[in-house]
Image (tube, rainbow, N blue to C red):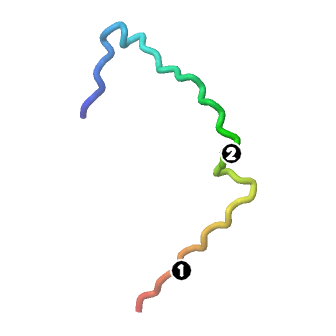
Amino acid sequence: MKTRPRKTSPSDIRRRPTVYPPLPPLPPDWTLVSEDTSAPAPAPAPPEAVQSE
């Protein structure tokens, strides 16, 4: 099994995650849709059993 290389140089040891500027706001004609809706979606019908003869 391979492992990641060790951080041996001082620049690697002190390296911080990249900080990105915040994203601009969405245009007004866009709508954010969330999966969590106030009305629950109807549950799908259970599959019917197939009987073999």
* Residue at image point 66% right, 33% down: 25
Q: Residue furthest right?
A: 38
* Vertical placement of residue 41 versus 47, above or below: above
Q: Position of residue 27 (x, y in %)?
A: 66, 39
| Label 1: which secondary element | loop
Residue 48: numbered disc? 1
Q: Position of residue 8 (x, y in %)?
A: 30, 11
* Vertical placement of residue 29 versus 21, above or below: below
The quarter of the picture where the N terminus appears is top left
* Residue at image point 62% right, 30% down: 24
- Horizontally, is 28 left or right of 45 in the view? right
Q: Position of residue 14 (x, y in %)?
A: 42, 10
**Earlier-in-chain disc, 1 versus 2:** 2
- Horizontally, is 8 left or right of 48 in the view? left
| Label 2: which secondary element | loop
* Vertical placement of residue 16 versus 10, above or below: below
- Quarter of the figure with residue 15: top left
Mark 1: amino acid:
Glu
The quarter of the picture where the C terminus appears is bottom left
Contact? badges 1 and 2 (CB < 8 Å): no
From the viewer's perspective, is the residue at label 1 or at label 2 nearer? Answer: 2
**Relative to the observer, which residue lies in front, 36 or 28?**
28
Residue 29: numbered disc? 2
Rate crowding at label 2 as few (under 14), some (14 to 19) or many (20 or more) other CA atoms within 10 Å: few
* Vertical placement of residue 47 versus 24, above or below: below
* Residue at image point 60% right, 26% down: 22
- Quarter of the figure with residue 2: top left
- Quarter of the figure with residue 11: top left
Q: State the separation of the CA atoms marked 1 and 2.
A: 43 Å
Mark 2: amino acid:
Asp
Rate crowding at label 1 as few (under 14), some (14 to 19) or many (20 or more) other CA atoms within 10 Å: few
Q: Residue furthest bottom?
A: 53
